[in-house]
């Protein structure tokens, strides 16, 4: 009697193996050795696993990030976080991602080093954008104007900075990283409030166009 064939696609195989690869990467780095170790633990043909990841560190790291995206969407769907204040939605979503990294700080540190290499900067930026987009969508954001882009760019920068702090945080329960995240979110919320006041409709506040016009053509 033979085992049933594995019918997963390569993407599915990478996603399923990625958390185990990350655990192995703490000792073996983002290498084929980590993939082999993960495959042996999962009972998957190591050769098939190595083929799926192509021996590329960024393929392994990308799969890990996408696996966290998937877990976040499963654990914190929009209907679960939708009743929270917006800053708490964002904090909860980012914190879920940080919690997924607990115990894998060395894998994260090595991943950040790999992502910072010039040849990987574009892929790293794309991953950051995708994660920020996933969080905003779960938070209920439906913006389609320029706010769609500014929100994701802002959250992406917050998340990237928090990851860097988290990777080196030796405080109990990562208290320093949590405090850093809270401060950054508070700063952004204050900025968004100020921006909303600045961009109110014409009948609610001053007109930016009129103001610029006065500066350019002062009354004589």
Image (cartoon, grey):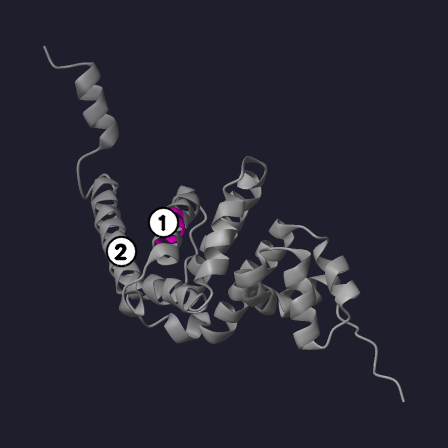
Q: Could you tell me which secondary element the residue under label 2 belongs to? A: helix
Q: Is residue 23 left or right of residue 92?
A: right
**158 relative to 48, above or below:** above
* Of the image marks 2 and 1, the number of the one nearer the N terminus: 1
Looking at the rendering, the stretch of residues picked out in magenta corresponds to: 157-162
What residue is drawn where x is 43% and y is 64%? 97
Report the Cα–Cα distance between label 2 and label 1: 9 Å
Residue 96 lies within the magenta run: no
Residue corresponding to mark 1: 161
Residue 18: assigned label: none
**214 relative to 124, above or below:** above
Residue corresponding to mark 2: 180
Residue lying at the far front in this picture: please name it: 27
Residue lying at the far left in this picture: please name it: 220
**54 relative to 202, above or below:** below
The spot of residue 117 in percent (x, y) is 53, 39
What residue is drawn where x is 77% and y is 58%? 51
Report the front residue among 158 and 23: 23
Mark 2 neighbour class, 10 Å CA radius: few under 14, some 14 to 19, many 20 or more: some
Q: Is residue 19 left or right of residue 12?
A: left
Q: Is residue 104 left or right of residue 213?
A: right
Name the image quarter holding residue 220.
top left
Question: What is the quadrant of the N terminus in the image?
Answer: bottom right
The spot of residue 42 in percent (x, y) is 67, 76
Q: Are marks 2 and 1 in contact (CB under 8 Å)?
A: yes
The spot of residue 26 in percent (x, y) is 52, 62
Q: Residue 134: tell me if it is visible.
A: no
């Amino acid at each position: 009697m033979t085992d049933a064939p594995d019918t997963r696609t390569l993407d599915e195989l990478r996603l399923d193996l990625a958390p185990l690869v990350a655990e192995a990467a703490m000792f073996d780095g983002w290498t084929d050795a980590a993939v082999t170790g993960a495959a042996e633990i999962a009972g998957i043909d190591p050769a098939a696993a190595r083929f799926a990841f192509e021996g590329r560190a960024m393929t392994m790291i990308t799969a890990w990030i996408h696996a966290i995206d998937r877990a976040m969407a499963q654990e914190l769907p929009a209907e679960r976080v939708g009743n929270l204040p917006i800053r708490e939605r964002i904090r909860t979503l980012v914190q879920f991602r940080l919690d997924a990294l607990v115990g894998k700080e060395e894998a994260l540190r090595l991943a950040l080093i790999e992502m910072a290499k010039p040849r990987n900067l574009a892929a790293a930026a794309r991953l950051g954008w995708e994660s920020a987009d996933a969080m905003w969508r779960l938070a209920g954001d439906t913006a389609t104007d320029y706010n769609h882009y500014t929100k994701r760019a802002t959250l992406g920068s917050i998340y990237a900075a928090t990851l860097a702090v988290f990777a080196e945080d030796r405080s109990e329960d990562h208290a320093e990283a949590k405090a850093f995240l809270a401060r950054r979110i508070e700063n952004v919320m204050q900025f968004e409030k100020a921006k909303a006041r600045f961009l109110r409709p014409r009948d609610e506040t001053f007109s930016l166009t009129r103001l610029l016009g006065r500066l350019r053509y002062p009354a004589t």
